[in-house]
Amino acid sequence: IERMADYPSSRQRSSWTFDKAELEEHRAIARSRALKQHENSEFTPSDEQKLLAHYGLKLIQLSRTLKLPDKVTSTACAYLRRFYVKKSCLEVDPQGIVLTCLYLAGKVEDCYLSAERLHSVGGIPEEIILKSELVLLQGLCFDLACHCVYKALVGGRIERGKGSDAEERVARRKMDRLLITDAVLLYTPGELARYCLGHAEGTDSDEVRGGINLLHEEGFHAEKHADEQTQAIDKTLKAERKRLK
């Protein structure tokens, strides 16, 4: 696994960090492919992003319930986002892949989680978690190294002279919200950490005024309206599945 110091030359930097236009192009290709099987689908690109935000939030909640290390949470959320760069939710239902992201992240980050344990807290059958592992690995192109965004927060706090516990809690809360958006695909861990710490300390920065701030607002909105939005989106997706049977 690549070390944090190797980030500039990492596969994460070269293969899994995009500009917005590149990301939209990859997703348009995936959606076009999916629509060949789902003609006249009412499931929109906006619905897909809301659904992924919902499952990203579930990943974080499950991680905290299981008291998992930050590196597992960060990696699992990155896997979910990476997988759906070149796949559409219409092709692979995120409900069936989300716990597999946590399962694989646990393996990679030396914190093994059994499928049985994940089933007990997440409700997805063990066989689906295990069966989805190869699908996930292929979707990730077997690029499993992820640089932990929470570790970047710790490094940033040391550079800035620590800061208060209250500021740390605010920064971590903001990082949680960014993890359920495309932030990990568009920005480096250091950029995200500077944004979160700057906001927590009340200091302005280019990142605060720019795109990361917009992504944080997106994450905040998704978190606030997660249940009501997801119910409607899930209903649309279930109708698509039923129509194809």
Image (cartoon, rainbow, N blue to C red):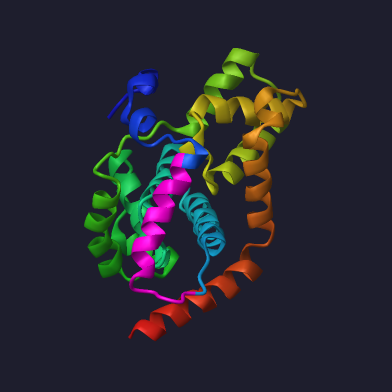
Between 204 and 245, the one lying in front of the other is 245
| x, y percent for residue 72 | 41, 42
Q: What residue sits 33% from the left and 43% below the top?
A: 111
What range is drawn magenta here? Answer: 22-41
Left or right, 85 with respect to 221, comes to left
Above or below — where is 120 with respect to 147? below
Between 116 and 226, the one lying in front of the other is 226
| x, y percent for residue 159 | 59, 13
Above or below — where is 170 with respect to 59? above
Q: What residue sits 61% from the left and 45% below the top?
A: 177
Between 108 and 244, the one lying in front of the other is 244
Q: Can residue 95 be seen in this snapshot?
A: yes
Q: What residue sits 24% from the left and 51% below the top?
A: 138
Q: Can residue 184 be seen in this snapshot?
A: no
Quarter holding the C terminus is bottom left
Q: Is residue 31 magenta?
A: yes
- The mark total stands at 0
